[in-house]
Amino acid sequence: MEPMLPMEKFFGKLELVYAFNGAMPTGVSVSETGRIFICFPKWGDVVKFTVAEIVGDQLQPYPSYETNLVHPGNITMSFISVQSVVADGKGTLWVLDTAAPNFSEPIKGGAKLVAVDLKTNTIRKVYTFSEDVVLPTTYLNDVRFDFRVGNEGYAYITDSSSKGPGAIIVVDLENGNAFRRLNGANSTSPDPYILPKVEGEILMNRNKDGSTSPFRLASDGITISPDGEILFFCPLTSRHLFSISTEALRDRTISDMDLLYQVEHWGEKGASDGMITGAKGTVYAGDYENNSIRKILPNGIMETIAHDPRILWPDTFSIGPDQYLYVIVNQLHRQARFHYGKDLRQKPYSLLRMKIDELPAPTC
């Protein structure tokens, strides 16, 4: 009889919250009252609705089925392909619509940030973007908020383009004025030296016709400090964490060239998709190469809090009022576009959670 050989150590107590047997989810957000919202971008799966709420053991289109139907005559009031949903802790669910199904060029006038009132479950406000903000190459990825600055607060959005410049898009929520910052900067661009490896294999574009190309995605993960003063961000194909003063980002008298010197490098945290900040200033980030979840303390110390074979591509994070860290696990790396047209994903996709004894960072 062969001896039992030593094995890799797995740790971190994860609970299954919801199993998805339909379309692949990317985003999750838990509201201050504990409601859970999910989004399903249109990446090739059959997506019946791109934004949903988990009600009991069911997914219900949110805020209505009608809103999730694309109306060519009224694309500003209908969801096209939503990448991110963020409950802001003060009664609003923000919906970030890429308007770029299958990573196409964004449909003109369709890329938007939508505020949905959680009390009435109706759209309160829609922010659209000019063509110098949402470029033909733009992919709106994730968003964070701070309502302590300006008259109605600011939003910060990552452009995770695979073909054009990455950037942080800054939005004044009072008037909708938006502008690109760190456009094409090293900190918002894919790391040209990384070879991402997931499940022991190099992650790269592998097309049906046998051709291959490197997988490159710009600024993706984004999160904000509890006082709203520091924005943390990272490109998807990079292992590095960066931060910048939000005041500097908003200050358009600082030139793009001078702004580069305001970026701080926190070192390697692993390759991450989503990130979130807790009320104590802890940054939580996935490490998709190592099936792990990591936390970065305000002093820069990093610690792995979960390492589990079920964490097959940790995508978006959210912290609930129950002090649990919620994470979408969606096997993104097993999609057909990385495997010569063969879809290797296995259902169900999952929403997992683990207790962290920390509330979400406040936005106001």
Image (tube, rainbow, N blue to C red):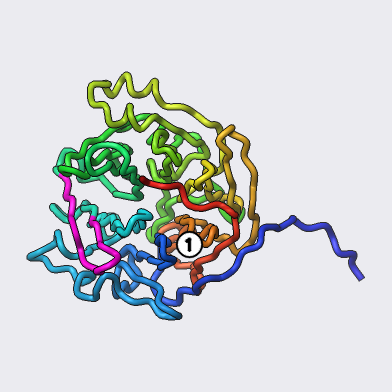
Q: Which residue is at the far bottom?
A: 57
Q: Which of these two is toward me, 57 or 110?
A: 57
Q: Which of these two is toward me, 120 or 135?
A: 120
The residue to which callout 1 is attached is: 328
Image quadrant for the C terminus? top left
Does the rendering let one see residue 39?
A: yes
Residue at 22 percent across and 64 percent down: it is 79
Q: Which of these two is toward me, 333 or 276?
A: 276
Residue 297 horizontal side relative to residue 95, left or right: right
Q: Which residues are magenta?
A: 114-129
Does the rendering let one see residue 234?
A: no
The spot of residue 269 in percent (x, y) is 56, 40
Magenta span: chief secondary structure? strand
Image quadrant for the N terminus? bottom right
Hey, what amino acid is under mark 1? Ile
Residue at 50 percent across and 46 percent down: it is 279
